[in-house]
Image: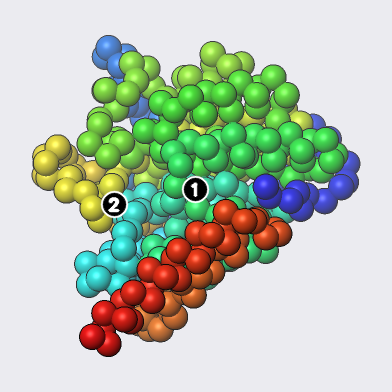
């Protein structure tokens, strides 16, 4: 059980605006102002609106004042060039870390790895929308969100190397340990959010899960509890199109964000490859949650560029042309195009970031390879607070088993 760390203070009055961690006051210069209605094809041929503030070509969208998008766009209307460069840096370094972890697994240094390749904008945008006193419940792929919460990336690798059960204190960064059981973190987040409300705090809670997890009963139950108890929780679904080898068409007949309607709270579909839109919509959702207006569901429409995990072979169930179409929507390239066209970054910035990226990769390799093997008997110390006869018996059996190898070597 996670101990609540929410501050006991009055909830905000309606109309207040949350200041996300990348919020700023200076206006953005050089943005190309256009108005565009973006849609995706939903089940049975219907059109589903997609909140998008930055096109794949790197053009900034400024919705009309009477547009449905205007409510979200105001949350990034005053973002500064420095903050935009910060978002770009976050995505580049997160991708570099992820690539290094994948390589380490292929080299036998990690047992498994779940890559976030292609989902950087959804994670960095939403992660930077959180405040320090908010609480995050991830799955096992939220490496970008962990980065935003200040978790050292090397701490994410201990579990995948098999040397610990999670390498950080959840209350140190208000970032829960990775959850392997699919969908259960939605219930954990809802219960925690109910506690936040009872504490009278104005912090928010956000739960991450994938499109595959949306089919789990735990997620449905979390939606219902959150709605009935008006819990200050945001459900952030990264719809990366594939639940391992199962496509969206085999999971749902309606867009995922519309499921929120059946539980009585709002749902929004955002372009998950657009870091500005992801930032804006998550700020909006967390803001209303902190004001006591209840839960919201965000469906970040994105794509898993790599395998589900390193044990998966995506070439068995999807075509290369599908990936190629999504590569054209690359979230990092999209923001770089905007930074360059708006003259917010020069070649010196990109060169320095490349050097920082290489240094991060080198540090990750060194730290992982230096991780000590765990004490073989430590697992028996974490079952009960006090001693237990059965555990003592199992420890003795395991000790005898280990000793048998030494005896065999001595023969």
The residue sitting at 31% across, 76% down in the picture is 405
Q: Nearer the viewer, residue 233 or 39?
A: 233
Q: Tell me the residue at 77%/40% (across/down).
A: 196
Closer-to-camera residue (235/191): 191
Residue 309 image label: 2
On-image quarter of the C terminus = bottom left
Q: Callout 2: helix, strand or loop?
A: loop
Q: At 50% across and 53% down in the image, what residue appears?
A: 178
Q: Of all residues shown, which one is farthest toward the bottom?
A: 410
Please determine whether, in this image, residue 292 is positioned above or below residue 409: above
In the rendering, at what x and y percent does residue 6 appear?
78, 49
User: Which residue is pictured at 70% across the width and 30% down the height?
Assistant: 231
Disc with the residue nearer the chain's start (2 vs 1): 1
For label 2, the crowd category at 10 Å Cα-Cα, with few meaning under 14, some 14 to 19 and many 20 or more, is some
Query: Residue 215 location, x and y as percent?
Result: 41, 26
* 48 and 382: which is toward the camera: 382
Looking at the image, can residue 22 be seen?
no
Residue ID for mark 1:
179
Give residue 293's position: percent from left, percent from top. 72, 28
Relative vertical location of residue 371 with respect to residue 327 in this rendering, above or below? below
């Amino acid at each position: 059980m996670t101990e609540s760390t929410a501050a006991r203070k009055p909830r905000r009055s309606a109309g207040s605006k949350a200041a996300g961690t990348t919020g700023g006051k200076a206006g953005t210069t050089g943005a190309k102002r256009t108005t565009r209605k973006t849609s995706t094809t939903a089940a049975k041929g219907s059109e589903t609106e997609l909140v998008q503030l930055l096109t794949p070509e790197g053009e900034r969208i400024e919705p009309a004042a009477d547009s449905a998008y205007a409510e979200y766009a105001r949350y990034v209307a005053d973002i500064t060039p420095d903050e935009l460069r910060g978002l770009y840096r976050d995505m580049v370094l997160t991708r570099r870390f992820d690539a290094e972890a994948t390589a380490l697994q292929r080299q036998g240094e990690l047992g498994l790895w779940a890559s976030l390749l292609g989902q950087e904008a959804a994670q960095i945008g939403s992660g930077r929308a959180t405040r320090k006193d908010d609480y995050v419940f991830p799955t096992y792929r939220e490496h970008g969100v962990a980065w935003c919460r200040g978790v050292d990336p090397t701490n994410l690798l201990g579990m995948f190397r098999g040397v610990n059960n999670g390498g950080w204190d959840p209350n140190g960064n208000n970032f829960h340990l990775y959850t392997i059981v699919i969908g259960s973190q939605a219930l954990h987040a809802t219960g925690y959010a109910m506690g936040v409300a009872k504490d009278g705090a104005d912090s928010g809670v956000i739960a991450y899960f994938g499109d595959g997890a949306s089919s789990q009963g735990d997620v449905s139950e979390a939606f219902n509890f959150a709605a009935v108890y008006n819990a200050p929780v945001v459900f952030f679904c990264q719809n990366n199109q594939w639940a391992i080898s199962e496509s969206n068409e085999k999971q749902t007949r309606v867009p995922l964000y519309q499921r929120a309607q059946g539980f009585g709270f709002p749902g929004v579909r955002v372009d998950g490859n657009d870091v500005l839109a992801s930032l804006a919509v998550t700020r909006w959702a967390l803001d209303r949650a902190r004001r006591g207006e209840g839960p919201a569901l965000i469906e970040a429409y994105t794509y898993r560029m790599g395998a589900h995990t390193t044990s998966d072979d995506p070439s068995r169930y999807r075509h290369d042309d599908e990936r190629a179409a999504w590569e054209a929507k690359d979230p990092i390239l999209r923001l770089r195009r905007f930074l360059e066209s708006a003259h917010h970054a020069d070649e010196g910035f990109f060169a320095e970031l490349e050097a920082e990226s290489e240094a991060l990769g080198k540090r990750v390799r060194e730290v992982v390879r230096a991780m000590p093997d765990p004490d073989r008997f430590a697992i028996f110390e974490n079952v009960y607070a006090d001693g237990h006869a059965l555990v003592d018996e199992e420890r003795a059996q395991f000790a005898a088993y280990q000793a048998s190898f030494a005896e065999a070597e001595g023969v």
